[in-house]
Image (cartoon, rainbow, N blue to C red):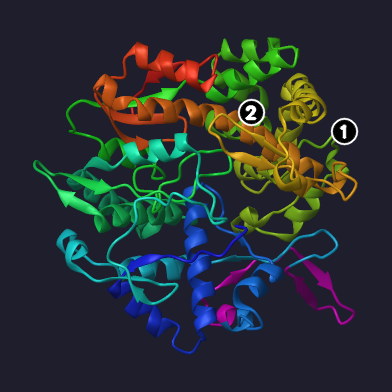
């Protein structure tokens, strides 16, 4: 995260526990701990490994000259600090390297799983307690019983685009099957007697989502309830993010249970939205789309089998590639960095790997369960299968930077900005040198971020337009799912056509799907 949170709402019982746990630490240490805890949860929800990069510069900006007692927090078992490398000293001992000025890598932190479990265990036990207990903002220690549904301005005091504000306004309260949700989380808890770390993460995510729902819920009848949906700042692409995640970031199994037994419930999803979006962009740039059309015509298992991995893992790697994931050229087992890294770590530490092509190679390392050579085999096969597409993606990104962006840019206050279909702006000046040229050190990051900005921006705009016209077509939007919507009532074709036209998403195909 590039900023420190200023709000984290929590029940009094959790605050009391943390006050005792951190009684020997400063207020700044306390706030740092809460920020890392919040960020670790978000990372787990995003199906990542929990590590939170926080630069020394950001710490100084937030807490001034106050020094965060990192080593003390670590020694007390309240903080994990990621080890990037180990340097062997002359006496045979090893010095752990946790950051690298040379490679531009800051320290990464994570809250230990056992501490996260204890925090969850100190939450209220019954549903009724959640409606009557006192709440606090852990970052300020002040009472915080009420939450603002969403803020109209961002951290720079600029208004969010009207499309996004109107979409947030239309999604108010989400109906859920509270009894089924409680049974689901309790079942996960029962399965943890002999569990792996992955199982713990799955439980922590769904339990946290349920607790957030309970903090803001009102009971209905027949085991149903509705909770107040709270939105944070939109993502850089214009996607909406539900604070506490609720029914947006929980597991698919939890969504199936949580939306069961609700009359008229519908789960809509944009079919292959990223692929169709890429086809539309390729057509605009006069780039060959045949590989993508062939991909859409076959079951994804065909491609997974070519690499030797699971279907879900293929989808994960493929989406990372579309979003600008890095693929190293001319890879050989003998000189590939993953071999060196994996020799130093055991299977339990696999998720701590960090190097340029981490999104794809980390996924394949997990698939290979720590076997470096098997991971390399997967990687080479994956690179071979997607090679023709990678050429097209590279050509598209070059076209964006050389042709599209110069033509579409605006220049308020000396900055170069582009706008996507949600109305969100992207500041290109941050990726330029003093001479106005693209900074070569930031070029890969720019290509990755600008790809997501345009691709996700178009699909987000489509979902937002469907949301704001819902009352005119008789359906109610319960939950924004980024590339889908959960509603009560059917979305008619006329509404889909309006959203397609207004968002400019040429190949938008909305389909109803089961939750699991």
Point 53% across, 55% down: residue = 157
Residue found at the very far front of the displayed protein: 413
The residue at which mark 1 appears reads as 330
Q: Secondary structure at mark 1?
A: loop
Quadrant of the rendered structure where residue 333 is? top right
Numbered disc in front, either 1 or 2: 1
Residue nearest the viewer, comparing 323 with 5: 5
First along the sequence among labels 1 and 2: 2
Q: How many marks?
A: 2
Q: Position of residue 199 (x, y in %)?
A: 43, 52
The magenta segment: 73-98
Residue nearest the viewer, comparing 275 with 364: 275
Q: Is residue 328 above or below residue 281?
A: below
Q: Position of residue 282 (x, y in %)?
A: 70, 17
Answer left or right for 37 relative to 14.
right
Point 86% across, 77% down: residue = 89
């Amino acid at each position: 995260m590039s900023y420190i949170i200023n709000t984290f709402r929590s029940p009094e019982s959790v605050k009391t526990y943390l006050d005792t746990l951190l009684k020997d630490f400063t207020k700044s240490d306390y706030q740092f701990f809460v920020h890392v805890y919040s960020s670790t949860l978000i990372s787990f929800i995003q199906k990542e490994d929990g590590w939170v990069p926080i630069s020394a510069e950001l710490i100084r900006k937030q807490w001034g000259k106050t020094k965060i007692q990192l080593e003390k927090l670590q020694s007390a078992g309240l903080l994990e600090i990621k080890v990037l490398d180990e340097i062997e000293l002359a006496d045979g001992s090893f010095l752990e390297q946790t950051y690298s000025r040379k490679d531009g890598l800051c320290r990464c932190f994570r809250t230990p799983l056992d501490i996260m479990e204890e925090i969850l265990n100190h939450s209220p036990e019954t549903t009724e307690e959640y409606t009557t207990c006192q709440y606090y903002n852990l970052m300020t220690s002040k009472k915080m019983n009420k939450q603002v549904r969403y803020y109209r301005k961002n951290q720079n005091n600029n208004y969010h685009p009207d499309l996004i504000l109107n979409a947030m306004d239309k999604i108010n309260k989400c109906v859920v099957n509270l009894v089924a949700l409680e049974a689901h989380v309790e079942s996960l808890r029962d399965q943890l007697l002999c569990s792996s770390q992955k199982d713990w993460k799955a439980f922590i995510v769904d339990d946290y989502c349920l607790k957030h729902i309970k903090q803001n819920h009102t009971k209905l009848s027949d085991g149903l309830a509705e909770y107040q949906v709270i939105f944070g700042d939109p993502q850089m692409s214009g996607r909406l993010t539900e604070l506490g995640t609720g029914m947006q970031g929980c597991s698919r199994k939890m969504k199936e249970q949580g939306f069961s037994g609700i009359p008229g419930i519908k789960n809509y999803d944009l079919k292959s939205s990223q692929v169709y979006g890429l086809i539309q962009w390729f057509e605009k740039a006069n780039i060959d789309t045949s590989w993508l059309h062939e991909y859409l015509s076959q079951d994804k298992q065909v491609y997974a089998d070519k690499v030797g991995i699971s279907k879900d893992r293929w989808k994960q790697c493929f989406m990372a590639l579309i979003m600008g994931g890095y693929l190293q050229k001319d890879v050989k087992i003998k000189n590939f960095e993953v071999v060196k890294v994996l020799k130093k770590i055991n299977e339990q530490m696999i998720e701590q790997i960090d190097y340029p092509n981490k999104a794809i190679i980390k996924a394949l390392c997990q698939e290979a369960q720590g076997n470096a050579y098997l991971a390399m085999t997967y990687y080479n096969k994956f690179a071979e299968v997607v090679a023709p597409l990678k050429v097209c993606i590279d050509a598209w990104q070059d076209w964006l930077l050389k042709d599209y962006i110069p033509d579409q840019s605006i220049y308020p206050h000396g900055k170069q900005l582009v706008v996507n279909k949600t109305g969100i702006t992207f500041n290109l000046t941050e990726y330029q040198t003093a001479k106005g040229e693209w900074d070569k050190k930031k070029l890969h990051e720019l290509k990755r971020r600008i790809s997501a900005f345009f691709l996700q921006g178009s699909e987000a705009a489509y979902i937002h337009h469907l949301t704001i016209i819902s009352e005119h077509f008789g359906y109610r939007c319960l939950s924004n799912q980024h590339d889908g919507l959960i509603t009560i009532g059917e979305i008619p074709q006329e509404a889909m056509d309006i959203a397609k036209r207004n968002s400019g998403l040429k190949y938008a195909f909305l389909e109803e799907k089961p939750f699991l």
